[in-house]
Image (cartoon, rainbow, N blue to C red):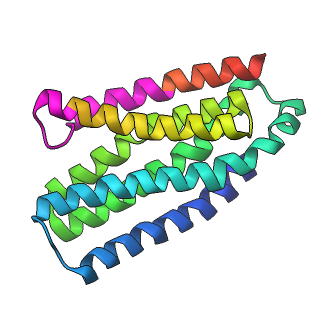
Amino acid sequence: MPFLIGSSFVRIFAYVASMVALMGLLLLWHGQKMSQSMSILMFAGMGSFMACGFIVVFQLLPALPQLRLWQTLPVSPTQLATVMIGMVILPLIALGALVSGVMWLALGTSAALTCLNSYTFILAPASFCVFFAVWRGAGITTYVLLLVTLFGFQQVQLRLQMFLHLLELPINLAGPIAVASVLLAFLLTRRVLLN
């Protein structure tokens, strides 16, 4: 299991980091059509959303056929649920830290906090995507549930921002939502693996 997390983490992190770097270069080359704060907000939101979708499609879904084999190994359901959720959220955490650090060096603290906030909130739908994928297996139903989860959480974020009259969710709200979602998804994934 450590080999699985280590090898897949490095590979998917490299893919997604290069994708986000390319997004930044394209934004720089294309020019700034809106205010800097709005550009940073759009870059952070789209970068985290695209990274999450890429990780779910190219890392989680290809691992599902091996799930039945992994369940026959002498590994507890708790460890397997940890590995499945870790396969998705660890690259997102590392990428969020990397992008936030680069933004802090390039544009300052507010840009770094915007990126950190966006990558923190995306952990919530990412963890629920793991639960739905483990629960339903590979198939059309799973793909629909994954799309509904990703876009549904984006709508939840937008509605919370509108309700609170904020341009972005504060980290003291996005953090607890992400932690609660990851813990709930872990417990649900573990329960599915037990049955």
Q: Is residue 30 left or right of residue 20?
A: left
Residue 142, horizontal then vertical, whole percent: 65, 36
Position of 124 with respect to 72 (left or right) is left
Q: Nearer the viewer, residue 97 or 20?
A: 20
Residue extending furthest toward the bottom:
29
Q: Is residue 50 visible?
A: yes
Quarter of the image with the N terminus is top right
Q: Is residue 88 magenta?
A: no
* Residue drawn at 80 percent across, 38 percent down: 67
Q: Which residues are magenta?
A: 161-182
Quadrant hosting residue 32: bottom left
In this picture, residue 190 sits left or right of residue 170: right
Q: Is residue 53 above or below residue 187?
A: below
Picture layout, residue 183 above or below residue 157:
above
From the viewer's side, name the closer residue of 111 and 125: 125
Residue shown at 62% from the left, 30% from the top: 132
Task: Give the image location of residue 76, x and y in percent.
Answer: 77, 25
Was residue 180 drawn as part of the magenta stretch in this picture?
A: yes
By secondary structure, the bulk of the magenta-drawn segment is best described as helix
Residue 186 image offset from top left, x and y in percent: 58, 25
